[in-house]
Every structure is written in structure tokens, then in C-alpha cells.
Image: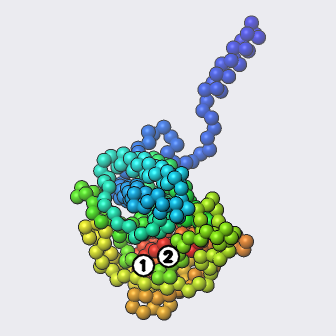
Amino acid sequence: MRSASILASLVSLAAVVSAAPPFTPAGGLGTNSTPPVYAPLSDFDFQSLNLALNQEWIELDLFHYGLAKFSVQDFEDAGLDAEDRFLIEWMADQEVGHATLLSNILQGRGAKPCTYQYPFQTVRSFIDFCQKLTRWGESGVFGFLEHLDSRAAATLLLDSIATESRQQMVFRQFEGLFPMPVWFIPGITQSMAWTLLAPYLVECPAENPRIEWQNFPALNVTNNPDATPYYNTSVIGNETTPAITHNRTDPLSYPGRDIFLSWETPGQKVSYNQSYTTNTTAGAPKYVAWISQLNTTYTPLTNISGQSGQTIQPGGRVFGDNTAPVVNGSMFVLITDSDLYVTPFNLSMLNPHVVAGPAVYQSG
């Protein structure tokens, strides 16, 4: 009888132990039993997600537009065959999914597709524009993702932006660039992303929600490195044919390179139906901000004459000697009135100090 009683107690104890939840470290957000809300929880959420939706719509249109604009021979002459073109079509299909996701999160209140304009006339410049546009689309989301009130919506958006990161790398490979020349992908603010996107929207449906982010005056790097020339030389280090990877012997840019800049005055009408006006709250232009990897680096703006000036491309390493160069890849430059110290999480503190920009700088 005593053995049976002990056995019953052990069985009962085992049942209690097996029913206990596994140990979870304390802390974390959204880890309780509260059902997730996959919808905007604030105006900040809505405006951020709607901006991302506008980005998805232009990517969908852009990929289809390029495939339709250029002939098979045009693509073949640029080293891109039928399988490469199918991959571009597949990336357009991915954008259908991304736009559907965001439209659902916004509960039907988000933007509808617009008509667009593009700055290219060749296959190579089409590919170049794609890798730049997907870069600012990716960085634009990284900049606000961790600030969303709706953590559930942020989770879904992260799932889609991970795909966009792969798209950007593919377009770099199509252009013959080194596929991933940085250790970290920087974020930019919504106003920076909207400034880059706005000029390409020509006309939008009347019911599209107004995009409430600031439009900064446009910035142009007049001697921006050009990755579009096509070299099929069979010489290692001097190839720009589409490939898994190329490593240039002669880099596109280098520390100490003279950079020439021009920018617009505020008050310009931009974007669809000319319904937005560029604006800045900054003082006089003094610095160039370089947003790349984990850093915002400043260089002095010199030889200022009206709406133009110059600077020097900075050097520096992410974590010091023998680590990755800070400036590399497709990154961002702005004109500012201050060399304000900011970090990736509080980059929006820089917005009031932006005189013009950003522009995408093709450093590598």
C-alpha cells in the first residue's frame, strides 16, 4: 500500500511538472497572451506604413516598366538573359505581396498606385536606379520600424523588408557591383525617404492619403561615381558584367575624394500634382552628413557659393583599424547646419538641421 501511495504521488507530481509552462526570461514586449493587433495604433504608424506602401507601389511599377521598355536584345547586350529577366519579374510579383500586406494592415485606407516618371534610358541605368531605389526603400523602413506603436505590424513589415534587402543585392549583382560591401545597412528617417521618393510620383488617385512627412530641398552630387559603364574585358578587377560578385581593382570612390554638391532652395513644388512644397527649418549650410552603416559622419562644407559647395569623402572604419570602411555601397549624404551627434535609433533628431538632401552617393 505504501509503495502504491508513493507511486501515485510521483505520477501526480509529474503531471504538475509537465503542465507547467517552460521557463521564459523576464522582459520583452508583446509576449503575453494579449492578441496582436496588425493595424496602425497611431497617426505615426499610419503615416509611416502608408509611406512604405507608396514605396512598394513604385517598385512594382518600376520592375514591370523596365521589362516592358527594353527589348530582349537590349537586356542581352547588358549581359542579362531570360533567367535574369524572369528574376526581375519575380521581384515584381514579390511587390504585389508586399503591397497587399500593407494595404491589409492599413485596412483599405492606404495609398493606391500612382503614375510615375523615371530617369533612365538604358538597361544599365534602369538596373542602377533599381538598386538605388530599393536601397532607400529598405533604409527608409529600417529608420522607423522600431518606433512603431504597433509591434505586430512592425513584425510583418520586417518580414517583407528582408526580401527587399535581397532585391537590392540582386540589382547590385546585375550591375556588376560587389554584392554586399557593408557590414550594416543604415536606416534613414521618413522625411529623408519621402524626399528621395517624391520626385518620381507624377499623378495619384484623389483618395490617396496625403503624405505628411517633410520634403527637404533636393541635393545633387554633381560628380557622383557612376557604376553604369559596361566593361566585358575578362580582366579580373575590371569587369562590370552581371555576376555573383566582382571586386574592382579601381574603386568607384575613395577617402579624400573631392565631392561637389548643389542644392535647391526651399519652397519648390514637388511630387504628384505638384501638391507638396519643400521645406527646411535649418540655418546656414555648414556640414555634409554621411549616413552609412552605424555612423553619421560629418565633413565641413567648403567653397560655399549660393546653392553649391564641396567637401571631401571621409575615411574611417566602423570599429577601428582592420574593420569595414564606414563609407561604402549606396549610402546617403545631406547638407546640414550642425554636426549634431546622432545614433541609428535617434536619427530623426537630425531632421530640423537638414538644409538639403539626402542624395544617394554611389561610393562603391
Residue in view at x 54 percent, y 51 percent: 83
**Corner quadrant of residue 206:** bottom left
- Name, please, the residue furthest toward the right: 3
Q: How crowded is mark 2: few (under 14 residues within 10 Å), some or many (20 or more)?
A: many
> Residue 194 at x, y = what percent?
39, 66
Residue 214, how many percent across, how many down? Answer: 35, 70
Q: Is mark 2 on a helix, strand or loop?
A: strand
Q: Residue furthest left?
A: 206
Mark 2 and mark 1 lie on one chain; the one further toward the N terminus is 1
Quadrant in the picture for residue 60: bottom left
Instruction: Determine which of the numbered discs, if any, sits on residue 219 in the image.
Output: 1
Q: Quarter holding the N terminus?
A: top right
Q: In this view, does 138 lie to the left or right of 3?
A: left
Circles 2 and 1 in contact, beta carbons < 8 Å:
yes
As drawn, the label of residue 122 is none
| Amino acid type for the residue under numbered disc 2 | Val
In depth, the one of 100 and 71 nearer the eye is 71
Q: Give the residue at mark 2.
A: 333
User: Where, quadrant-wise, is the C terminus in this rendering?
Assistant: bottom right
Tell me the kind of residue under disc 1: Leu
**Label tally:** 2
**Relative depth, front residue between 63 and 261:** 63
For image coordinates 64% across by 70% down, the residue present is: 233
Give the alpha-carbon distance from disc 2 to disc 1, as whole Å: 9 Å
Which one is nearer the viewer's eye here, 15 or 73? 73
